[in-house]
Amino acid sequence: MDDVLNPDYQQFPLLRYAKRYEAELSAGDVIFVPAGAAHQVENLADSVAVSMNYVDGSNLSRAIEELFALALRGGKDEEVTLSLAKYLSSPDFNATVNMQQEPLSFYDFKRQYLLYQKLSENQA
């Protein structure tokens, strides 16, 4: 698709039923994009952005699949990507991951984080 902000509904007719969210962030704001969620970013002004992917037991297999697929496409980082996919697939790495981790909604994550923050403040 050439322009996700102005999609071609002739070529992608079901896209008209997709729910679209828009947000304008200010300095210091953070946005959470769930794993696998398609997203588009447009900077309205010069900016510095930090992006992070979090991998745990709830999405490890998906991350490994995506890394192997990326490595198969080739490119300048093919060797590094393949090496990372192999490492994440290794028994040595899997022994360090809680594979029983259930997917966590952002609401639950935030609630647990705020509880952790409060407990940390009480210990200080």
Image (tube, rainbow, N blue to C red):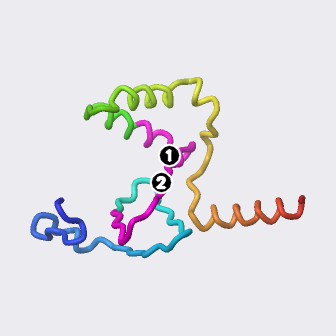
Residue 63, position in %: x, y? Answer: 44, 41
Q: Among all residues in the image, which is located at the extreme right?
A: 123
Q: Secondary structure at mark 1?
A: loop
Residue 14, position in %: x, y? Answer: 21, 68
- At horizontal 23% and vertical 68% (from top left) the residue drawn is 15
**Residue stretch rendered in magenta on the structure:** 40-64
User: Looking at the picture, does residue 42 appear above or below residue 97?
Assistant: below
- At horizontal 34% and vertical 73% (from top left) the residue drawn is 20
Kind of residue at disc 2: Ser
What is the total number of numbered labels drawn onto the structure image? Answer: 2
Q: Which residue is mark 2?
A: 51
User: Looking at the picture, does residue 120 appear above or below residue 86?
Assistant: below
Quadrant, the N terminus:
bottom left
Q: Which residue is mark 1?
A: 59
- At horizontal 16% and vertical 65% (from top left) the residue drawn is 12
Kind of residue at disc 1: Asn
- At horizontal 50% and vertical 63% (from top left) the residue drawn is 32
Left or right for 14, reference 118: left
Residue 47 found in image quarter: bottom left
From the image, give the main secondary structure of the stretch colored magenta: loop
Left or right for 21, reference 4: right
Q: Earlier in the sequence, mark 1 or mark 2?
A: 2
